[in-house]
Amino acid sequence: TELVPDLLPRTRRLFLLLNPCGGRGNAFQQCHSHILPMITEADISYNLIQTERQNHARELVQGINLEEWDGIIVISGDGLLYEVINGLMERPDWEDAIKMPVGILPCGSGNALAGAINYNAGFEQAMGSELLLNCILLLCRGTVMPMDLVSVTTCSGTRCFSFLSVAWGFISDVDIESEKYRHMGSARFTVGTMVRVASLRTYKGRLSYLPVLDGHRPILNGPKDDLIPPLGQPVPKTWVTLEEDFVLVLAIYQSHLGADLFTAPFSSINDGLIHLFFVKAGISRASLVRLFLAMEKGNHIEMECPYVVHVPARAFRLEPLTQKGILTVDGEQVEYGPIQAQMHNLFLYSGSN
Ligand code: ADP
Ligand code: MG
């Protein structure tokens, strides 16, 4: 009859984007052995596309018909989701586009968002195929939730959208320098950390931020950066500014910086907060190693190391005063120089919870 089809749940149609080069390069095998059988079982229909090069996913999502899909899922690390989100935000109809649920099935070396989603769902911290299976289950369940989204502006005036982190110093150095150990999977970060600890660097910089003064979130209309003046103009008087020698500066808005790095236990997927973390120069190598080891379980917060500072903020500006260095946004390298960011209240859906 005419009535029945409306009463039945409609088959979900997912647009799957697979990065064959993510992590150890086994996303394709994982997809055929685990992912496709499970989502087929859950009565999900899909179109699977393998990305052929960097920015391919970004271009593809700019061209899709939003009406045709119930979600866009990346089978990769965080880098491919970064492309998808930025591709959606670059569309003229971004206000509708960003309502498209997105999800991640972790097959990369950087699987921070999957770690955060896994934690948010109440699962034990997991890695590898265990984490992947949890994320497939959550995707099949099909619940959608809002997620914080941050706009980041770099020195040339380019603006991008970020769901994870902005990093400078130790963390971005390890992330980018360890690209050469990509074949090791997520172990590349452990090796990279040891290499960086051995030749520890510090960076001089100015960090300014808009502190969180009350409990409620500012209401923002669309992605206009109404909390931050343009780079080059001074920050408002209500901001806090400090000039320091840093080992690292990290702005993080998810609980995890990697599947096994529970860096911001107090952060949740939609708390509307940028958690600023910094480590000041003077910390011993031993303390720094202890800090990263404790981070696996989130125990570093109890260490109360005087060189490690955490402040929640709505917006921040970072002005490197050291000539050379590496800046990353969601683990992807961006141009080096002054950088600023602010939280948005946009509702982005994390289709995997
Ligand atoms: P990982 O966590 O291992 O870094 P990502 O999903 O973050 O995995 O992907 C890393 C990078 O690979 C991203 O910057 C993405 O743009 C790029 N990429 C996507 N498809 C391809 C491809 N076919 N060949 C090379 N690089 C690609
Ligand atoms: Mg990556």
Image (cartoon, grey):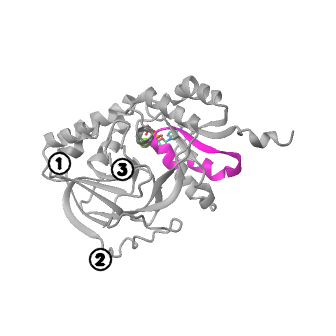
| Cα separation between marks 2 and 1 | 29 Å
| Cα separation between marks 3 and 1 | 18 Å
- Neighbourhood count class around disc 3 (C-alpha, 10 Å): few under 14, some 14–19, many 20 upward: many
- Seen as rendered, the residue at the extreme right is 1
Residue at horizontal 25 percent and vertical 68 percent from the top: 241
- Neighbourhood count class around disc 1 (C-alpha, 10 Å): few under 14, some 14–19, many 20 upward: few
- Dot label at residue 304: 1
| Amino acid type, label 3 | Ser
> For residue 259: magenta?
no
Q: Answer yes or no: is residue 290 visible.
A: yes
Is disc 3 in contact with disc 2, using a CB cutoff of under 8 Å?
A: no
SS at circle 3: loop
- Dot label at residue 237: 2
SS at circle 1: loop
Is disc 3 in contact with disc 1, using a CB cutoff of under 8 Å?
A: no
Left or right for 83, reference 179: right
| Amino acid type, label 1 | Glu
| Cα separation between marks 3 and 2 | 27 Å
> For residue 65: magenta?
yes
Query: Can you tell which of label 2 and label 1 is closer to the viewer?
Result: 1
Tell me the magenta residue range: 58-83
- Relative height, residue 119 to residue 281 (above, below): above
- Relative height, residue 124 to residue 113 (above, below): above
- Relative height, residue 96 to residue 289 (above, below): below
Which residue bears the numbered disc 3?
267
- Neighbourhood count class around disc 2 (C-alpha, 10 Å): few under 14, some 14–19, many 20 upward: few
